Image (spheres, rainbow, N blue to C red):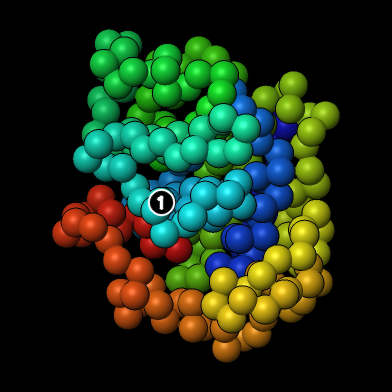
């Protein structure tokens, strides 16, 4: 299984990595995400979802309902599964979850706490392991199936700012942003911090009280 590593020292690096990973994914793919509580699994999935065309504000860890589905273009789906509450010992758990439907050929499936059900999965899948390096830095170890090699981007240890990116609009100011802009996808350092302030000031609202398991959403 091909392996890549990426060290992301800030959220912008992680967003760049997410866009490169999103370019790799196809309907029918399954990705298991591993890492300790607070490593940033939900953050990575939120950024992947945004890169695939989903509004990141609707992406939250489905701890209580286990799975969320988000429509993608051309009739495909993004399926976000949180396996935290699954035991991972009995195949019936996946049957009760509706695994065959959730992981159909029209779906890109991302599973938080994937190690809890890895022993029940027989199909090929990718694994992303997130290591907490320090307050702001994360190391991503990415293991891909052999047959993904032909579509595999050069993930690399330090994501270059403009590799494989497209012009976009700053989510704060609405201004056009070039792929080689130093604060991509934001138009400026001020816009980047304004977006971060929205999270800390609760401008982005979670629709239920925060539980301990939700702490995994932090970068």
Question: Which residue is outermost to the bottom?
Answer: 190
Q: Which residue matches tag 1? A: 59
In this rendered view, identify the residue nearer to me: 162 or 116: 162
In the rendered image, the vertical position of residue 202 relative to residue 150, given as above or below? below
Element at badge 1?
Answer: loop
Q: Nearer the viewer, residue 106 or 38?
A: 106
Residue 77, visible in the rendered structure: yes
Does any portion of residue 40 appear in the rendered image?
no
Left or right: residue 70 versus residue 29 is: left
Residue drawn at x 27%, y 28% is 86
Report the front residue among 59 and 44.
59
Can you give x and y, in whole percent of width and height, for residue 113 in the image? 38, 38
Q: Position of residue 66 (x, y in %)?
A: 29, 34
State the image coordinates of residue 51 (x, y, percent, origin top left).
Answer: 61, 52
Quadrant holding the N terminus: top right
Q: Is residue 152 left or right of residue 205?
A: right
Residue 128 horizontal side relative to residue 25, left or right: left
Tell me the crowding category of disc 1: few under 14, some 14 to 19, or many 20 or more residues within 10 angstroms, Cα based.
Answer: many
The picture quadrant where one finds residue 138 is bottom right
Quarter holding residue 106: top right
Tally of numbered discs = 1
Q: Residue furthest front?
A: 74
Residue plotted at (71% across, 43% down) = 23
Which quadrant: the C terminus?
A: bottom left
**In this picture, is 63 found above or below 215?**
above
In percent of width and height, residue 128 lies at: 55, 41
Kindly identify the residue that appears in the image at 73 percent across and 74 percent down: 177
Residue drawn at point x = 42 percent, y = 23 percent: 102
Foreground pick, 200 / 177: 177
Q: Is 206 situated above or below 129? A: below
């Amino acid at each position: 299984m091909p392996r890549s590593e990426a060290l992301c020292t800030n959220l912008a690096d992680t967003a760049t990595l997410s866009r490169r990973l999103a370019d790799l994914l196809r309907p029918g793919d399954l990705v298991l995400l591993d890492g300790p509580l607070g490593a940033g699994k939900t953050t990575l999935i939120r950024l992947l979802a945004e890169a695939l065309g989903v509004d990141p504000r609707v992406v939250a860890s489905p701890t209580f309902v286990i799975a969320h589905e988000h429509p993608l273009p051309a009739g495909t789906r993004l399926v976000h599964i949180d396996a935290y509450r699954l035991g991972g010992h009995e195949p019936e758990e996946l049957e009760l979850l509706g695994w065959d439907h959730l992981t159909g050929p029209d779906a890109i499936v991302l599973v938080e706490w994937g190690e809890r059900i890895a022993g029940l999965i027989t199909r090929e899948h990718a694994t992303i392991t997130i290591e907490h390096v320090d307050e702001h830095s994360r190391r991503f170890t990415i293991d891909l199936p052999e047959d993904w090699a032909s579509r595999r981007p050069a993930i690399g240890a330090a994501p270059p700012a403009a590799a494989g990116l497209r012009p976009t609009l700053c989510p704060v100011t609405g201004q056009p942003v070039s792929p080689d802009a130093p604060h991509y996808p934001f138009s400026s350092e001020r816009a980047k911090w304004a977006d971060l302030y929205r999270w800390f000031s609760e401008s982005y609202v979670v629709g239920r009280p925060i539980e301990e398991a939700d702490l995994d959403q932090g970068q």
